[in-house]
Amino acid sequence: MVSALIAVAFAGVLASPAWSQVDVTAAFSDDATEATTGVFVTPPVAPVTTANFARLRTSMRPITVDSPAAAMPVVVDSSGGPIEVWRTDGTRATLPLSIDPGALPAQLLVNARFHGTSTLTATESGAGSDSILFRSGPFPGLAGRELAAFPFFEQVAAIQENDIVQTAIDPVRHADRIGQTYDVYIVKHRSADQWAVDNILFDESGGIETAVVTAGGVQDNVVDAWTTGLSGAAGTGLGVAYDVVYDFGMDGTLDPGDLVDGVKYADAGVAAFDSGGVDIDEAGFYIVHDLTQPGPFATQTETEFGGSFLSQRYVFPANIANMGKLPFIQISHGNGHVFTWYAYLQEHLASYGYIVSSHANDTMPGINAASTTTLTNMEYFLGNLDTIEGGIFEGHVDTSRIMWIGHSRGGEGILRAYDRIVEGSYTPVNFDAENLVVLSSIAPTDFLGPFQSLPYGKNYHMIYGSADGDVSGTPSNNIAQALHLLDRGTGFRNLTYVHGADHNDFNCCGFNDFQGPPATQIGRDEAQRVAKAAYLALAKRYFEDNVPAKDYLWRQYETLKPIGVAPTTTVVNMYKEDGPEADTFVIDDFQSQPATNISSSGGAVSFDVTNLVEGILDDGDGSFSWTTNDPMNGMTYGRSNDSTAGVVFDYSSAAFLEFEIVAPRRDLSRGQFLSFRACQGTRHPNTTARLGDLTFDVTLRDGIGTTSTISIGVYGGGLEEPYQRTGAGIGAGWQNEFETIRIRLTDFEANGSGIDLTDIEAVRFEFGGPSSDDAVGRIGLDDVEINRGR
Amino acid sequence: MNTNDPRRIGGAVTAIALGVAIGISLAVLGTTETAHAQNAQGAVAQAESNPSAFTAVPVQNLVVAQRFVLDESYESDWSKERPEVKQGTVIVVRTDKSLLRPRQSAMPILYVNDRPAEQTNFGHESGCLVAIVAGEVDLRSARIFHGTPGTAESVDAAEGRAELEAATAAGAKAFPEARVTKALDRGGEPIRLADRGALYAQVVAKLIERFSPQEAERAELYRGFDPANR
């Protein structure tokens, strides 16, 4: 539809008669582009009002209306939708706007209210007219990293200080700027309010780069904007916030018409096209330090003995007396473990400003007993702040921000404890369920099955080693299949799956239970470096809604590995946005609709991949040996009476799997990512035939048949090959490792692909094709959805 | 009298008796091996996928039996019925250490007759378990054995009876009277304590320290259970 609109506009409206003296011109553009592809306007951060005009003016595009020989007023009006016009003094110019000849040339600002196209026309009666086609759509930002193939550039939030900062502009999206020269500034992040009062640019990267928007592709417009001296020293924070400004005025100030990556927009719903927006103070990018390194605070350790199974060890900032209220983290150890064994994690998190307690956990009788000690220790601490350690914590605990971490039986115990609160069998005295911001299990057991240890909609994280010799994941023992708990959640969930780590690597002193190829053993120190980084990101994400921390939870570890983690260490991330807050459009979760030819959202599913089976993600025969009788081989995400489900299939030549987007949901333009989780099928001949990361293509197709295709491998990595552990049958390869792949929707638009995100008809996965290195494969797939990047 | 102090029922201080118990050298402990104990670790592993395949393994020796009474009872987490523990016996048993390696998944449950005992340590290095037997128990007729792997908190009375039947059928027997008498002698007179915390701090911790010294950190933890030690 967009192309049609442009064509109509071009033929019928845009061409100015030769005799016309009226001229309307967008800043940093030219008449030729204005009349063809149009002028791109970045979407607003919120509806502009008189009150917020100063904050939002920089997102508007300046235009000049003139008619040198005007004898009559020039009337400015629009057709087609999303734009509104403001005067530079901050007053709204109601259209049609009549401008007296004496007021010409007139400077105005154009704001795009929605995504779409609109034509602005200036007309002088009897003297002709001139028009500009405005286009408004998602603006992915400027900062990121260059890719080797389409879409050639990826916008990211987190850039580590051992990396470089690259910026890029897509010369097709911004075709109106081709040939324009600009200065690249990396500036300390400012909110819209701050930009309103101070728009002077001060570059922090050691030099201003000057470049010209060049015709071609985004890959022809990449600037290495900051290559040395990056510092992520954010104190207790995670990430130093910067904005990127493309100063097209080249005057050292941010003005309308310049581009800024650091004023972000989010609205309330994927489907709600004009549901209104919210201003989110999010920088263009963040430089992040080594998350494995301690934070700025010296720590203090104290031990409290409060009675039977009320022993607690606290680690906290030593100068807590001079601090405000700090989030609280409680660790519940596992069976045979001791509460003093988590000093590494306690000290790390405390050095960033958290109070971290590890308590004696009564795990031997079972999970209910463990859950009781999780609860009683919580009550003890919060109920005795005035006396514990002489009252040192009094007034310094933020009881609205609490994280529970539990290891193994304790990892299930914390969920049981939460479940008891939810089901009403336990009523907290000194806290309530809302105070629990995030729960995290380290290699938890699953004694109690699907109905008693649930995270429900709470934010839930799991860290788990592939070489765990205890909660091993073996298909014959449901109790030892930790991943069950993850899939029982209904809120935000993420997994940090660490190759070569065993069960006791995540404490100081448990015995070595490593089970796997000896050469893959990463050791306790390395496993704990991974854990320290993961938990710091987790705390920052959920306690503070830290933006770059999110990147560590979902991006491929190959492309965002904490600096202190060894280059050879393999970690698989899974991240799912779920629950009402996520506002996710689920294309297919494979649960509510068991038919293989209909998705859970009601769209048609078509395929020519082979041996496609949809079902519960539960290995059916207790062995990881591959057999055609057990299509869910390697799946350890649920018991037979769990509800988690997915699809498995294989291919030996080019094949596809396509999901139709139902008509009411085809406008994906306000979504951030196409997201899904996928894994390789362990020990399947197609997996063992080519051990390594597996890649394939993802294609969007719009309503007029335009397609845009991205290989998941372009971002680095792919679907990790299963950890090559033996046992539990014949062959090598342990449990299937679901890994989240998220592709930014705007990436499909790169370089003028022509895809219309407002009218996406289908998401198509293409395997074994010419752009893939992997001619054969066995894959599990789940949770195909459009999410908000939250 | 300080109610946190160990007291013998009837007023006689039991510290001496306890001292006798914990003064026993590990070297003098019995080392009876049983056929059931052989390949026990393999049996545990096998039981992961098929718990019913596990054959009960009797403990090898009863080393100490210390009876106690509490001023304040506590609710036990060690069976589904969650009985109140007002009195009982702390026992030290020697067993096949290959059964005892701490695990997160199901471990063989220590039974005294048809009820799980409150196991307080792991004993995987020493081979010695310190456990609390709730209520009255006649150790001269008691079968003490490792039953089907699981968690004690989920065992109900019917399951406990089935475990005992299975163990008896598998050859579990009561210890000879002389051995039980010796264990009781080592334990000494019954002891009266304030509560569970005191039991752990003043009896269990010392027994662990003595018979399973590798678990000194656990003994130290239990010492902290008694408010008197804070």
Image: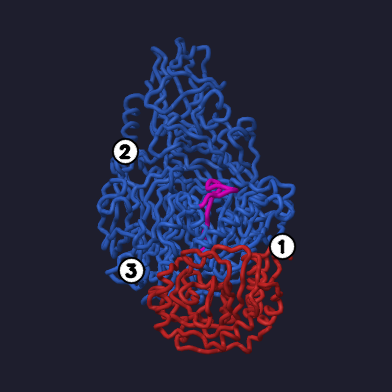
| Subunit under mark 2 | A
Residue under the image location 45 percent in, 64 percent down: A446
The spot of residue A71 in percent (x, y) is: 46, 10
The circle on residue A32 is none
Quick one: label 3 or label 2, which is nearer the N terminus? Answer: 2
Looking at the colours in the rendered structure, which chain would you say is drawn in red? B
Colour mapping = by chain
Identify the residue position indicated by label 3 in the image. Answer: A686
The amino acid pointed to by label 2 is Pro
As helix, strand or loop, the secondary structure at mark 3 comes to: helix
Residue A710 placement, left or right of A232: left
Residue A759 placement, left or right of B85: left
Tell me what hue chain A is rendered in.
Answer: blue
Residue A566 visible in the displayed image? no
The circle on residue A664 is 2
The residue nearer to you, when weighing B226 against A228, is B226
- Same chain assignment for discs 1 and 2: no
**In the picture, which quadrant includes the N terminus of chain B?**
bottom right
